[in-house]
Each structure stands twice: as C-alpha cells, then as structure tokens.
Image (tube, rainbow, N blue to C red):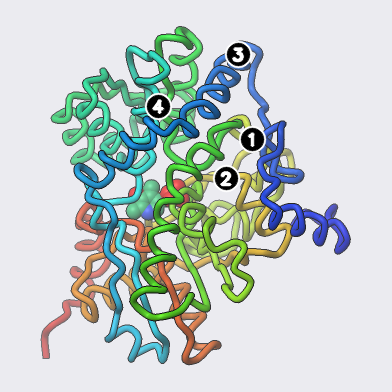
Amino acid sequence: MNDNTIDTKGRERLLARLLAGEFPDQQGRYGPFGGRYVPETLVSAHERLEAGVARWLADADFQRELQQELSTWVGRPTALSHAPRLSQRWGADVWLKREDLAHTGAHKINNALGQALLARRLGARRIVAETGAGQHGVASAAACARLGLPCTVYMGAVDMERQAPNVGRMRLLGATVVSVTGGDQTLRAAIDEAMRDWVADPEGTYYLLGSAVGAHPYPYLVRELQSVIGREARTQIRAQSGALPDLVIACVGGGSNAIGLFHPFVNDQSVAILGIEAGGRGAGLGDNAAPLSFGRPGVLHGSYSMLLQDGDGQIQETHSVSAGLDYPGVGPEHALLQACGRVSYEAASDADALAAVRECCECEGILPAIESAHALAGARRWARSHPGKRILIGLSGRGDKDMLTLTQMLLAKAPTGAA
Ligand SMILES: *Cc1c(COP(=O)(O)O)cnc(C)c1O
C-alpha cells in the first residue's frame, strides 16, 4: 500500500469490518475510500439514484425481470471451462470463467442491462453513457435497443478514431455517438461530458456508468450487478472440481469484472485473491495504467481512490496495449481490498499479456481479450511459485475486437504455425 497513513491496527480493523459486510457504509465509503465528491448540481441526482438502487435491487419483480433477461438474452450462466493444456503447462489446475461468451462479448453487458432496467423503473426517458474503447458503449447501445430507450454515447475524438468498428456497432444498434473534442479527447473527457448531459436533465436522463468507479452509489451498484460472475463461478467450480479454488484472479481496469468475480469469495478464508493491473511498458510515469501498483490516493470522477498523478496532483497520462484497462483511476472498493490486505494487486506488462493471448489461443482454442490476458499472465506467474494449486481465472471478454492490435503486435512480428 502506497498510502502509509494506514497502520497495522487500522488494517486489521478495516479487514474485520470488510468481513462483516459493512462496506459501503452510509456515506458510500469503503474505509477511507469512495464517498461522493460531486458538484452541488449533481448531489440530488446521486441521491435520487441511491434511493432507486435501494428500492429496486431489493424488489423481487425487478430481480425476476433481470434474471429472465440475463438467461434468455445475455446467455447466462456463462460456462466455467477447465483448461487442461494450460494446467499441464503451468503445473496447476486452471479454470476459466467465460465472460467472453456473454452477449456482446464481455462482462460489460451484465452491468449495462441491469442499469438500463433500473433506468426504466426510475422513469428515465433517455440514457447517456461514456465509452473509452467502445465496449461499454456497445453493451449500453444493445441494452437500450432491447428496452426501447434512446441512447447517447459520449466518446473521445481520439478514441473514435482508434475504435472505429465499435463506433459503427453502436450506430447500428441505434445509439447516437457524440465525439468529445475537449480535454484529453479520451475516456476521462467523455465521462465529464456525460455528467454534464446528466446535470441538464437529471430526472429524465439516466447516466449509465461503465465500471465500478465514480461517486456513490455507482461502485456499489456495479458490484451488485457484476457479482453474478462470482456467484456462478463459485457454484460451478465446486460442482465441477469438488472444491473452492486456491486462487481467484482477474484483470483490473476500473475494476468491475474483478469486483464481480471477487466479491462472493471475499469471506472464503482459504481463497487467495489477486487483481492484475495494466503494467504497460514499465513503472515509469505515463508508462502504465496501474494505480494500485504505482499510484497515490486522490479524487477522480467523484470518488477518493488510488490514482495515477504527479507530485502536484495532476492526473497522469496512461499507457496500456489494452484500451479497456487504460484509465488512471480504479474503483474505491479495490483500494480498500488492497489497504486491508484481503486482495493483492500486481501488474502484468504489455508483452506478458500479448504472450498470454497467444498461449491461450494455442492451448485452449479461446481468443481472449487483451484485457483478460493480463489475468492469464498474472496467473501463470503465480502458478510458478505455487505449484499444483487450483486457479480460477476471470476471462472477462473475447479478443475479436483486438484483431487489429494482435495482427500488428503478434502476427506481423513472429508468424506462428510455421516450421
Ligand atoms: C472494459 C473491459 C475490462 C476492464 O474493465 P473493468 O471495469 O476493470 O472490468 C476488462 N476486460 C474487458 C474484456 C473489457 O471489455
């Protein structure tokens, strides 16, 4: 932990409160992290959302509708696949939770669908969303089309160019994609712009946030909607292997797929948990997107959490080969899980993630997203120092969207299958 204000005693107290299920607290805090740091104009919108979340997530009819859509439209439960050839190579017992098989190709649809259903219950007439790589935009556009809600997606101008196929996908699915030319012209600016839209009409508009970040209640709401991953995986691995895993591991961008997989295992004391951030080119300023590994606490997008910033508190540029992990902040619950010692976080480099894409393709016949391959790389490293253990890996999405990058970085350099 880079925040040396939490001593051993404080850490133990936080862990006890975590295991007692006390987070988030009434203020939306996860120990020292989280909360709601928003301008006055957005306070009542967040309060209304908080009340709506409390009401509808506990409503049996809402849950029935959500389950029905998850099973008949998203394709849940997603499979848990044993990975026999990776197991043999790594000297471990490897299992893959297959979010790549969910509709639109990743875990993001669990959250987009759940929030779109919530928005309809709250009487919203339109949805706004932000997107970086375009995956959350595609999931939001699909969920809104399914429910007949108009959808506007804000996307940085730079990202629109880099992720042109996803822009087309969103438009086909009926969304209006708005190019954001201010700020850094990427995800950070797109979030600011979506917030501005929401402020203009906080009752008629619903802001569909794409990860376990932002002000309370978003990190909690997204965790609840993504925890279906961990609940399914926990049941499946016990049924298929006869026991709980020794390690649960997932990649961490904003942290939604990871918190969804981790949450149902937090109270299983025999289970180690490991989050893998984007290590990029290395530990230097601007070379990675790993705030838990290299950042310091600060406020971004309404929440106090670990953050990549310079000595003056300026947000740093980030780098990752994987667009979906390229964000300078991380959800506040991960900052807590790290601070109290329940979950460890490490970084995997661009090169290790790319190698893991290839290994997973060749050994298991599965093309993982480059994001997900960070978890594979981290698992492979852990297996070397923990021989013979059972490892559950969150495979957050499929890699078809990454073919341009993979063609340039893997196929052009070292053709495989020859010789
Ligand atoms: C967006 C994305 C991620 C990163 O987002 P989290 O909120 O950290 O889960 C990871 N994997 C895939 C496939 C994604 O599309």
Disc 1 residue type (three-letter): Ser
Find residue 352 and report its horizontal and vertical position in percent.
41, 72
Element assignment for label 3: helix
Give the residue number, with chain letter if any, for mark 3: 44
- Mark 3 vs 2: CB contact within 8 A: no
**Mark found first going from the N terminus, 3 or 2:** 3
Callout 2: CB less than 8 Å from ligand 1: yes
Disc 3 residue type (three-letter): Ser
Disc 4 residue type (three-letter): Leu
**Mark found first going from the N terminus, 1 or 3:** 3
Give the residue number, with chain letter if any, for mark 2: 331
- Mark 4 vs 2: CB contact within 8 A: no
Q: CA distance from mark 1 to mark 4?
A: 22 Å
* 3 or 2: mark nearer the eye: 3
**Mark found first going from the N terminus, 4 or 2:** 4
Q: CA distance from mark 1 to mark 3?
A: 16 Å
Q: Is residue 349 visible?
A: yes
